């Protein structure tokens, strides 16, 4: 109970004036529950007894309130001003309280109608919008944006490397092809001292590490190329060389996780995996995750809180949205990174069957690499792919190939020595690509001019043809609809051709 209110009540000597002032205070809707109770009891006693006992009423309502703490009474000519000051101060105090409650609702994501009406409509000047520094930071972004190259000329030439904040999906119906290309991209990235988190769905982490070791055996001439059926035993000298070299030089840059580490059932479990392994990378290399690989997105599980979801489109929509957020800002740190996923299609894609890619996959992927299954040879010595969607806009009109050694889990470029100096090769490829693009635009422009002229000629011929008589058409062999176009002798006789 406010001392100021009690002091105002005490200052009235005339009950009629007090009653009017109390009604004024009640209708202002600024009193607390105890203060409203105090005013109501005063009105009741005045109505019944024409007098009231203020000390008694206060003691009943709030025994801790000491009326002796109230100061001297106000003069009668001051009372109206004091009441208005009291109401004004209470309204300001209530606004601050309401603001705090409304802002807390916003923090807690409780966007009810009252909150929105109060804050956004009545007090727009209180809304604090963070200053946009995107343009000011653009130079820094360009300077610090390191490309992550796949190690394959055709892919890097079109995609300009794996760009932070983007999702690139490898789509195809053959699991071995997608896994091999995906794993080889991851291998090429860790060879550039980048950190890769490899999330494997279906294949165990043991299988993935075996494939990485087999792939590593193809990287140096000092190794004997291992095969899928190799003896994974360090007592095997050839295997031991590969094993220890990979462990010493590359293992710290890759973490493989499978469904024994996470159940891929909720976004929360994925967040825990990303957080744990990002910290592990920071502890071992001093830097967090640089690339996330999700191998076999189509086999991922999703739990909605009540049951497992089996619809592939629903799962893809949920997981892709989650990965897109993480790609834009890993663990809300503001650090953008690229993501690669593989997605197994149900149908066998033909080269020109663009509409077979699921809409969800197409719409939520920034880039799509389509494996052309009908053009791969059965021995898996070559893989054919097409850049089907590209954030930069440049797509392939025809498939290209990369060489493959399936027994060694090795996919290598058709362009010699690309991996040895990939950045220089990519820069040269970009310049060549720009030149070809300009030449192509000029060619298209010239072709359009020529086609326009040819069309004009066709129109002129049609116009002349329409004006010719039947005999004239026969003479000039313009009427192709009758016989073989030969001119009869009786017609020739009418003309002196000697």
Image: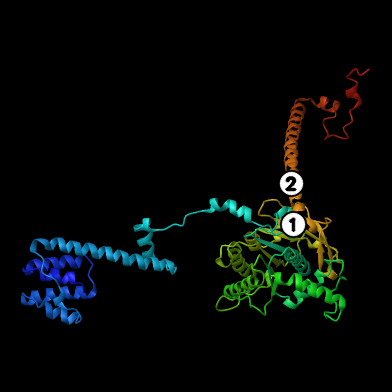
Query: Which is more toward the observer, 307 or 142?
Result: 142
Q: Earlier in the sequence, mark 1 or mark 2?
A: 1
Res. 284 image quadrant = bottom right
- Residue 331 lies, in percent from the top left, at 57, 68
Q: Which residue shows up at 90% across the image and 23% down it? A: 492
Image-based side of 309 in relation to 93, left or right: right
Q: Which secondary structure lies at badge 2?
A: helix
Coordinates of residue 483 in the picture (x, y in percent): 87, 35
* Mark number, residue 192: none
- Spatial CA span between label 1 and label 2: 15 Å
> Is 323 on the left-hand or right-hand side of 209?
left
Density class for disc 2 (Cα within 10 Å; few <14, some 14-19, many ≥20) is few
The foreground one among 124 and 390 is 124
Q: Quadrant of residue 47?
A: bottom left
Q: Position of residue 496 (x, y in %)?
A: 90, 17
Say which of 351 and 482 sits in front: 351
Taking the view exactly as shown, the residue that stands out farthest to the right is: 498
Q: Is residue 228 visible?
A: no
Q: Nearer the viewer, mark 1 or mark 2?
A: 2
Rendering coords of residue 462 (x, y %): 75, 30
- Give the number of the disc on residue 155: 1
Is residue 82 visible in the rendered image? The answer is yes
Quadrant of the rendered structure where residue 93 is? bottom left
- The label shown at residue 431 is 2
Rendered view: 133 above or below 65: above
Quadrant location of the C terminus in the rendered image: top right
């Amino acid at each position: 109970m406010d001392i100021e209110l009690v002091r105002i009540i005490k200052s009235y000597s005339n009950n009629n004036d007090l009653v009017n002032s109390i009604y004024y205070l009640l209708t202002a809707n600024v009193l607390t529950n105890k203060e409203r109770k105090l005013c109501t009891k005063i009105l009741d006693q005045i109505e019944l007894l024409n007098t009231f006992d203020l000390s008694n009423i206060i003691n009943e309502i709030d025994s801790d309130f000491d009326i002796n703490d109230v100061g001297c009474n106000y003069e009668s000519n001051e009372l109206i001003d004091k009441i208005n000051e009291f109401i004004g101060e209470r309204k300001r105090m209530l606004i601050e309280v309401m603001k705090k409650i409304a802002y807390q609702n916003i923090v807690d994501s409780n966007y009810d109608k009252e909150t929105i009406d109060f804050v956004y409509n009545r007090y727009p000047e209180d809304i604090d919008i963070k200053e946009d520094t995107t343009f000011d930071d653009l130079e820094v972004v360009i300077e610090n944006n390191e490309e992550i190259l796949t190690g394959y000329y055709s892919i890097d030439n079109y995609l300009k490397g794996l760009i932070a904040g983007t999702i690139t999906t490898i789509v195809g119906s053959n699991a071995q092809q997608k896994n091999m290309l995906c794993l080889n991209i991851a291998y090429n990235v860790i060879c550039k001292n980048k950190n890769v988190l490899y999330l494997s769905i279906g294949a165990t982490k043991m299988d993935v590490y075996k494939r990485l070791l087999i792939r590593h055996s193809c990287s140096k001439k000092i190794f004997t190329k291992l095969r899928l059926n190799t003896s994974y035993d360090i007592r095997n000298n050839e295997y031991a060389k590969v094993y220890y070299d990979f462990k010493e030089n590359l293992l710290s840059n890759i973490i493989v996780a499978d469904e024994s580490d996470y159940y891929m059932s909720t976004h929360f479990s994925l967040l825990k995996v990303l957080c744990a392994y990002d910290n592990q990378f920071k502890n071992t290399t001093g830097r967090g995750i640089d690339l996330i690989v999700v191998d076999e997105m189509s086999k991922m599980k999703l739990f909605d809180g009540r049951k497992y979801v089996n619809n592939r489109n629903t799962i893809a929509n949920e997981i892709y949205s989650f990965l897109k957020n993480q790609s834009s800002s890993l663990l809300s740190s503001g650090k953008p990174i690229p993501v690669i996923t593989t997605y197994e299609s149900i149908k066998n894609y033909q080269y020109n069957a663009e509409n077979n890619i699921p809409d969800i996959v197409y719409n939520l992927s920034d880039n799509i690499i389509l494996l052309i299954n009908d053009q791969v040879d059965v021995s898996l010595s070559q893989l054919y792919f097409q850049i089907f969607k590209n954030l930069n806009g440049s797509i392939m009109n025809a498939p290209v190939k990369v060489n493959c050694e399936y027994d060694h889990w090795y996919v290598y470029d058709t362009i010699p020595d690309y991996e040895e100096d990939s950045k220089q090769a990519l820069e040269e490829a970009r310049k060549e690509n720009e030149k070809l693009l300009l030449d192509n635009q000029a060619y298209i422009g010239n072709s359009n001019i020529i086609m326009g002229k040819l069309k004009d000629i066709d129109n002129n011929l049609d116009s002349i043809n329409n004006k010719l008589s039947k005999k004239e058409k026969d003479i000039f062999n313009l009427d192709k609809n009758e016989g073989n176009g030969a001119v009869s002798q009786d017609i020739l006789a009418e003309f002196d051709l000697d």
